[in-house]
Amino acid sequence: DSGVTQTPKHLITATGQRVTLRCSPRSGDLSVYWYQQSLDQGLQFLIQYYNGEERAKGNILERFSAQQFPDLHSELNLSSLELGDSALYFCASSGGGETQYFGPGTRLLVL
Amino acid sequence: GQNIDQPTEMTATEGAIVQINCTYQTSGFNGLFWYQQHAGEAPTFLSYNVLDGLEEKGRFSSFLSRSKGYSYLLLKELQMKDSASYLCAVRVDRGSTLGRLYFGRGTQLTVWP
């Protein structure tokens, strides 16, 4: 158990819909990272937050957005969903050290 | 951009030793990580190298050569449960992107009895 929690574990929705994925980092960790993992793309970095502020952006689509709240939990919002958005979405957190610890992931299926 | 290469698949037998290589080309390099990921599960941290040399941790060791842009993960006394994908990830610190990791596509290791 990494100490990072993610909800929900599974999500099934339809094209065009909007969903919100939630992540709680390990106690004391200020950085939160979001990743997307699909079978053909590997682990793709989406976005990083540090203590409530956006720190780095990766291959995140404009239909996707994220934020980190004062209590340090983070949410990833995915809108106008397409079939190709079906993937595993991981959240990771890190503290003052370098290592990122991953949550169990949310498996999203868009039908 | 970042270029991280590792073999797609490897196989080995129980009790054997396997070495998984990773080469990278990047600017702002500040460390290399290895993660293990079982299918459908979260990546779990195995090792971190920032200086040249070998880091040993039980059955697993990781080596880094910064000048060659090269790392390997060595797994000894292989067990069936070691069958998993092994991800090489490079940490890049550049401007505001502190701590960002770039991942390779992963090496799927299958351990046979």
Image: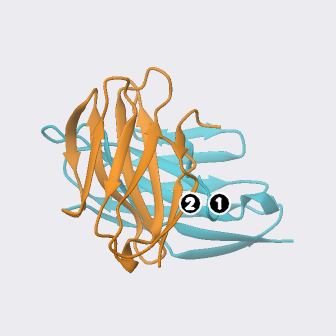
Chain colours: A orange, B cyan
| Residue matched to label 1 | B38
Seen in the picture, residue B47 relative to A45 is either above or below; the reply is above
Towards the viewer: A12 or A2: A12
Quadrant assignment for the C terminus of chain B: bottom right
Task: Please name the residue shown 81% across and 63% down the image.
Answer: B80
Q: Residues within 10 Å of mark 2 (few under 14, many from 20)?
A: many
Q: Which mark is residue B86?
A: 2
Task: Please name the residue shown 83% across and 61% down the image.
Answer: B15
Residue B85: quarter of image? bottom right
The furthest residue to the left:
B95
Dot 2 falls on a residue whose secondary structure is strand
Residue B104: quarter of image? bottom left
In front: label 1 or label 2: 1
Query: Residue type at mark 2?
Result: Tyr
Towards the viewer: A9 or B90: A9
Query: Residue type at mark 1?
Result: His
Quadrant assignment for the N terminus of chain B: bottom left
